[in-house]
Amino acid sequence: MRAALLVLAVLLLAGPAAAEEWGTIVPGATTTEAVRARYGAPTRSAPVKIDRYDAAQWVYEGAQAPAGIRRMTVDFGLLAPGGYRPDVVRSFRLEPKPRIFDRRTVLAGWGVPTKTAREGEADVYFYQEGLLVYFDKGGFDVAAMVFTPPQPEAPSSAPARAPAPSPTAPAPPTTAPRQR
């Protein structure tokens, strides 16, 4: 619980430095309008409260999710040095279909992680530029990827727990992440 609160606090206080990105979404920069223009209306949305701030969460699932992704969750509302910005992406989470992202794809696309950890039986990669990668229990396929604004330094313990992915249908052809 403390680790989750620490990660949330860091996300709320993060500045406008360059963040990792995927599918044109850049945490700390992309707005609700830009997400809607790129991906359309979400499958579902919900208002959320973070501390005393009103925020929103959009979920894209099934046919509305990007190709190769089972679920994409976008969290809006960022406390920036200039004040609270409710329409800016704070973080987003991708839950890819099996065999879309694996350990080799992550290393080829994002390089060597800043820090690695274990959470239960699964590996977690931490990238200071703003990416957490949770692998499945087998250790090869990615279970979830969480994109955030850049982080000041690697956490001293493993990041917050990611839920286990549910079974899905066979994956469509893979798409490569951006190359550095």
Image (spheres, rainbow, N blue to C red):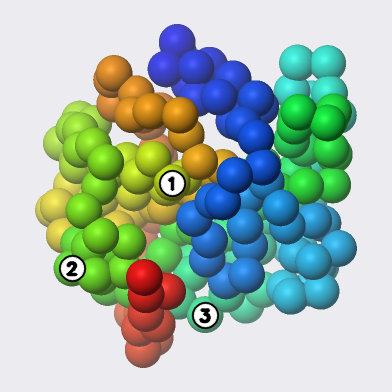
Residue identified by numbered label 2: 104
**Nearest-to-viewer mark from 3 and 2:** 2
For badge 3, the amino acid type reads Ala
Percent x, y of residue 38: 74, 75
**Nearest-to-viewer mark from 2 and 1:** 1
Question: Which mark is first along the chain, 1 or 2?
Answer: 2
Q: How crowded is mark 2: few (under 14 residues within 10 Å), some or many (20 or more)?
A: few
**Disc 2 versus disc 1: distance between alpha carbons?**
19 Å
Give the residue at x 80% y 56%.
31
Q: In which quarter of the image is residue 34?
A: bottom right
Percent x, y of residue 130: 46, 45
Q: Indicate which disc residue 92 carries.
A: none
Residue identified by numbered label 1: 129
For badge 2, the amino acid type reads Arg
**Residue 75 seen by the camera:** no
Q: Which is nearer the eye, 61 or 52?
A: 52
Question: Which mark is first along the chain, 3 or 1?
Answer: 3
